[in-house]
Image (tube, helix red, strand yellow):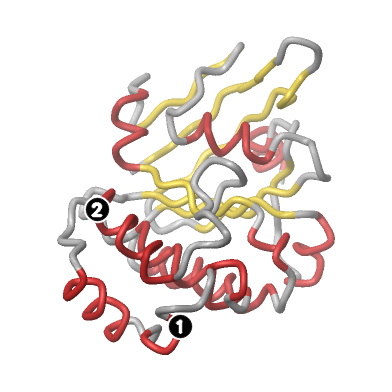
Amino acid sequence: MEIVADAVEVTGAHSTLLAPTSLHVNSGDLLVVTGEPHSGHTALALALSGRLKPSRGRVLVDGADDPKALRRRVAIVDGPEITEPEPSVPVRTAVAEGLSIAGRRSGRAAVRTWLAAHDLAEHADTRVENLPATERTRLLVDLACAAKHTDALVLDTPDRHGGDPSSWFALAKREARRQRAVVVLCSPHTADRLAVPHARVGADNRAEEGAR
């Protein structure tokens, strides 16, 4: 799978939500994209997953302008006010909803089995907002991957929950090794802590790669 964002820009009624951004990611790649708060992380996540039509530019999947394919194959993990679970619900409820969205069995027995298989049984009654940051991201990554058609993940600012970023970065690397295309959106400070190369929101990252 190849996703190419070509000068993607999103404008709102009163301001620019996402400055023109270009990047590409293939199956097995892990791309870290940084930006300051309110620079357009979630707008970029929505555009990359075909859930928001750019005001300018385009997003291609395997060379085609196909938002439907993007929506089917790209999952946004924990997007603020988009795919993040309701903070007050217990983990078992979030799992039931996630499995249902993934087209999997989501009854009580199926939820118990899933929680046990993912070492989360002890958190079944924990409110999502009280999950440790590492467990929260692992839960949501694994639920996103429960759908058989998920070929790409966009982790939307997992660093906003605090904790050690190396824990969720290890999850991102795990999914890239499984040949998913993985994009992590985070702050520049987090990328520096991880000591990893990174692209930037609002930049032509393909041009910068070519220059290197």
Residue 145 x/y as whole percent: 33, 60
Q: Position of residue 13 (x, y in %)?
A: 73, 10
Point out which mark residue 107 bears.
none
Drawn side of residue 63 relative to residue 54, left or right:
left
Q: Is residue 40 left or right of residue 171?
A: right
- Residue at 76%, 70% (x, y): give it: 195
In the foreground, 119 or 107: 107
Residue 71: image quadrant is top left
Residue 100 numbered mark, or none: 2
Q: Quick one: quadrant of the N terminus?
A: top left
Looking at the rendered structure, the secondary structure element under dot 1 is helix
Badge 2 or badge 1: first in the primary sequence: 2
Going by the numbered disc 2, the residue's amino acid type is: Ser
**Along the line of sight, which residue is nearer the eye, 147 or 106?**
106
Instruction: Please tell me the numbered disc located at residue 123.
Output: 1
Return the x and y of residue 121 as percentages of the image width and height: 36, 86
Under mark 1, the amino acid is His
What SS does tag 2 mark?
helix
Count of numbered circles in the view: 2
Given contact means CB atoms under 8 Å apart, are the residues at marks 2 and 1 in contact? Answer: no
Q: Residue at x 57, y 76 (%)?
A: 131
Give me the residue at 36% from left, 62% from top.
Answer: 143
Within 10 Å of disc 1 (Cα), the crowding (few <14, some 14-19, many 20+) is some
Q: Is residue 97 left or right of residue 82?
A: left
The correct choice, above or below, for 38 with respect to 97 in the image is above
Q: Is residue 16 above or below residue 210?
A: above
Find residue 164 and report its image quarter: bottom right
Residue 206 in the image: x percent, y percent?
63, 35
